[in-house]
Image (cartoon, coloured by chain):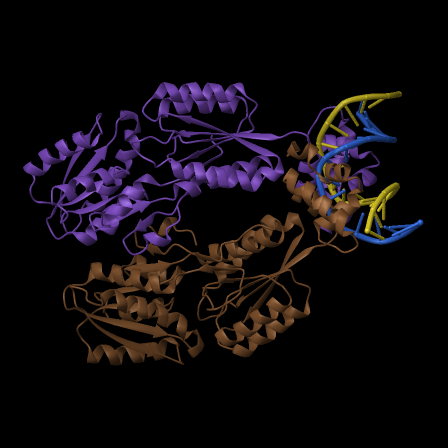
Chain colours: A brown, B purple, C blue, D yellow
Amino acid sequence: MKTNLQTGVKEIARRANVSIGTVDRVLHNRTGVSKVTKNKILDIMKELDYQPNILARRLASKKVLRFASLIPAVSSETKFWDAPIKGIEMAEAEIKQFGIVIDKYFYDQNDKQSFVKQTKNILKTEVDGILVAPIFIEESLAFSKLCNLKKIPQVLINSDIPNETRLSYIGPDLFQSGHLSAHMVNYLIKKNDKILIVNISKEIDSYHHLLRKEEGFISYFKNHEKKPTIIKTDITPNTDYKSIAAKLTEILAENTDVKAIFVTNSRVFSVAQFLEKTGLQHIFLVGYDFLPESITHLKNGVIDFLICQKPQEQAYKGIMALYQNVVLSGDVEPTYYMPIDIITKENYKSYRN
Amino acid sequence: MKTNLQTGVKEIARRANVSIGTVDRVLHNRTGVSKVTKNKILDIMKELDYQPNILARRLASKKVLRFASLIPAVSSETKFWDAPIKGIEMAEAEIKQFGIVIDKYFYDQNDKQSFVKQTKNILKTEVDGILVAPIFIEESLAFSKLCNLKKIPQVLINSDIPNETRLSYIGPDLFQSGHLSAHMVNYLIKKNDKILIVNISKEIDSYHHLLRKEEGFISYFKNHEKKPTIIKTDITPNTDYKSIAAKLTEILAENTDVKAIFVTNSRVFSVAQFLEKTGLQHIFLVGYDFLPESITHLKNGVIDFLICQKPQEQAYKGIMALYQNVVLSGDVEPTYYMPIDIITKENYKSYRN
DNA sequence: CTGAAAGCGCTTACAG
DNA sequence: CTGAAAGCGCTTACAG
């Protein structure tokens, strides 16, 4: 702490024979300093390996920094987005003493327009960094471009957008997570068994997300010794329990020999509900996310494995990445794949989202 | 940030009709303030819900805070303790701007006396918080008592000490992790299969640690439908490859029908090495920790599952818990069980220690 | 028992 | 283009 005894702005000012005000100007790359003075100061800073004292900076600065978060609202359909909110709030509690405020925006994940509307609302405000879960590719890309023009750093969570100049992506490697799911299913099935893949989603847009997992899953069994038969069904756009039950009834009637089901998202709890009600618990079931409804079915054995990637931590890390970049001017990993966690009956108790 | 405009020491002083120096005295519970004044100030602080500004406090304070860490040194035997060091360093980088310094002490995990010696060295210094991995129960308890007398908060990682007045334990629930291991082995074996448990340790003292996992493992198969036969072997005190190979050769000659081996610590890589050399890769193998040697064997299929509990994060969280308690005067969970991670061929790439 | 002043390392007007 | 001063919310001697 008191290491910068001889290395603060004061010392730089002394050596450069200028006032600390001038040092501050070059420190923040402001105008109104002669080339000569500027270079002299820059040289001294380099020589001293000057590291600004963040405490002093934030204490002295009047300016509060504003981050915005934009994620889907928690819906009756799934409480998945509860976890990211918690992560954001945790990060906020930690960095608010640095004068950072986080404005939380939400959109309806079944309504593109609500997303667009919120991006506009955000850009109306003064904002120094944005955390976003980009469900809609096109719209997210457009938003991202606007942010880049305004030089606002963005961190993406949950799913990535290709070809993006975002500051960082923090979330799953979707393909790899499908691969792992297949690996777990592999422990459950025998040779030549039949596997059913189930995609459940209202919006066709969130599909690429699920399809990527599906690809990973299928690729695992390419040329695999167990040679399972893999069939799939898409349940869309109606995703209430009734619609799901109807579709599953139909497909399982045609395929009475299905031994395992892989659900590509958190709606695995609906499938579990169905299997339980219809007495089909013997079918192995693997799906996603740590939701209470799913845990119940993990406990009673209807669900065998849940794959989860700490949504709370994704959001927490996302905000902290912004903090790292904006406040500390530090480097941030452009892509941070979250570990792919396997949750079973035996370890769910100590799982931390 | 600028929320405490009307809520700082200044405002308290104004309301109480005293100087800020006096406010500071009661804030830090120092002597030299009359009961009456003290209570008046206390009341006002409560009324204002006063939250000290940590930035200002650390900036103004001359005192640097010292934390000490005491963990086993990395040995040629296992590089396990590399990860905690990294965690400590990460935390250090994050909090050094708050004027915190971490002194790192190491001991030989095969030598009690080296542990005792280091605890003495630590207590010779001015220290405001201690992180310790307590391998030796007795000695750790004694150390802990001394710390309590000196009112130095201690955080334990890796393994807990029963009946302890530590600030917090951050690490595995050993029994539960043994349970999960059994659960994973269960996916690999058939009815009536034979399972071998292997404990490898030089020091009998680190045994309680391994035995707890063993208990969890065995308890899983109590009254289990698969009714496996479980045998065990302890390899101690010599734990070089030769001794391990000799012992395994012996026991596998007597038990040619062993279908799965559970190794209770990171030495699983030695067992893997043995199985590979002797062409016994078909025996399923489950063990602990994310070491490079083990990952190699995970990749080539000799090891089926590794159980790991983020040693780096344990240490990181341990330091941050001290920071939370000492710097921010915040609450800390007395027991924080780390999630029990399952590592396979398919997800090791994204695993974060 | 209490107060007034200096200072931590910065930023922010304001003056020239 | 540059400097001098005030201030952020605390802590730390020092004086009384």
The structure residue drawn at horizontal position 34% and vertical position 36%, both measured from the top left corner, is: B79
**Residue B334 visible, this angle:** no
User: In the rendered image, which quarter contains the C terminus of chain B?
Assistant: top left
Along the viewing direction, whichever of B146 and A15 lies nearer the viewer: A15
**Residue B235 visible, this angle:** yes
Along the viewing direction, whichever of A279 and B115 lies nearer the viewer: B115
The structure residue drawn at horizontal position 66% and vertical position 37%, both measured from the top left corner, is: B58
A208 over B177 or under it: above or below: below
Q: Is residue B115 left or right of residue A5?
A: left
Q: Quadrant of residue A255?
A: bottom left
The structure residue drawn at horizontal position 63% and vertical position 73%, both measured from the top left corner, is: A120
* Image position, residue A73 (x, y; %): 52, 68
* Image position, residue A224 (x, y; %): 19, 64
A209 over B339 or under it: above or below: below
Q: Quadrant of residue A238?
A: bottom left
Q: Is residue B114 left or right of residue B56?
A: left
